Image (cartoon, rainbow, N blue to C red):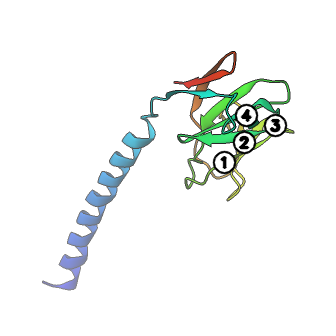
């Protein structure tokens, strides 16, 4: 096989592989996981969530309590490279410590290299039981 034919076939094969990867990646990104779990805030494992400004990561979800006593819950992994985000209580926003992508308290992208926002989850507090759900 000559060089020109080899490079031509390599290009066709590479394009097919690239298209397959894009197709498979986009399917995973558009399917947010269903979430439904409860935390008992009276237990020592979750009691810190009763203090405004604190946050915890549970089952891939970052849960935070704002200074105005509102619970936020979003996906914990930055969509850029999967680094765990952190809560910034002074601004009620989430930040990726790796590349400084910023997200609102509801997960919307503000800035940075992240291609999109974080998945937002609902919260409901009943006594000491905090429910996080899709």
Q: State the separation of the CA atoms marked 3 and 4.
A: 13 Å
| Residue 89 found in image quarter | top right
Q: Position of residue 51 (x, y in %)?
A: 81, 33
Within 10 Å of the Cα at label 2, are there few (<14), some (14-19), or many (20+) other Cα atoms? many
Within 10 Å of the Cα at label 1, are there few (<14), some (14-19), or many (20+) other Cα atoms? many
Q: Secondary structure at mark 3?
A: loop
Residue wearing tag 3? 53
Q: Which label was assigned to residue 94?
A: 2
| N-terminal-most mark, 3 or 4 | 4
Q: Which label was assigned to residue 47?
A: 4
| N-terminal-most mark, 2 or 1 | 1
Q: Position of residue 64 (x, y in %)?
A: 72, 34
Q: Nearer the viewer, residue 25 or 57?
A: 57
Q: State the separation of the CA atoms marked 2 and 1.
A: 6 Å
| N-terminal-most mark, 3 or 1 | 3
Within 10 Å of the Cα at label 4, are there few (<14), some (14-19), or many (20+) other Cα atoms? some
> Which residue is rendered at x = 67% and y = 32% of the image?
43
Q: State the separation of the CA atoms marked 3 and 2.
A: 12 Å
Q: Are marks 3 and 2 in contact (CB under 8 Å)?
A: no
Q: Position of residue 3 (x, y in %)?
A: 22, 84
Q: Is residue 79 above or below residue 39?
A: below
Q: Secondary structure at mark 1?
A: loop
> Which residue is rendered at x = 16% and y = 85% of the image?
2
Q: Nearer the viewer, mark 3 or mark 4?
A: 4
Determine whether, in the image, residue 108 is placed left or right of residue 16.
right
Q: State the separation of the CA atoms marked 4 and 1.
A: 21 Å
Q: Are marks 3 and 1 in contact (CB under 8 Å)?
A: no
User: Residue lying farthest bottom?
Assistant: 2
């Amino acid at each position: 096989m000559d060089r020109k034919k080899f490079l031509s076939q390599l290009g066709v094969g590479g394009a097919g592989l690239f298209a397959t990867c894009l197709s498979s990646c986009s399917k995973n990104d558009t399917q947010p996981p269903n979430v439904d779990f409860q935390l008992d805030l009276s237990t020592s494992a979750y009691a810190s969530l009763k203090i405004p400004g604190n946050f915890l990561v549970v089952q891939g979800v970052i849960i935070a309590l704002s200074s105005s006593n509102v619970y936020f819950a979003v996906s914990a992994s930055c969509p850029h490279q999967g680094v765990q985000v952190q809560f910034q209580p002074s601004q009620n926003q989430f930040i990726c410590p790796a590349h400084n992508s910023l997200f609102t308290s509801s997960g919307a992208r503000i800035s940075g290299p992240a291609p999109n926002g974080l998945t937002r989850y609902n919260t409901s507090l009943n006594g000491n039981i905090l429910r996080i759900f899709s």
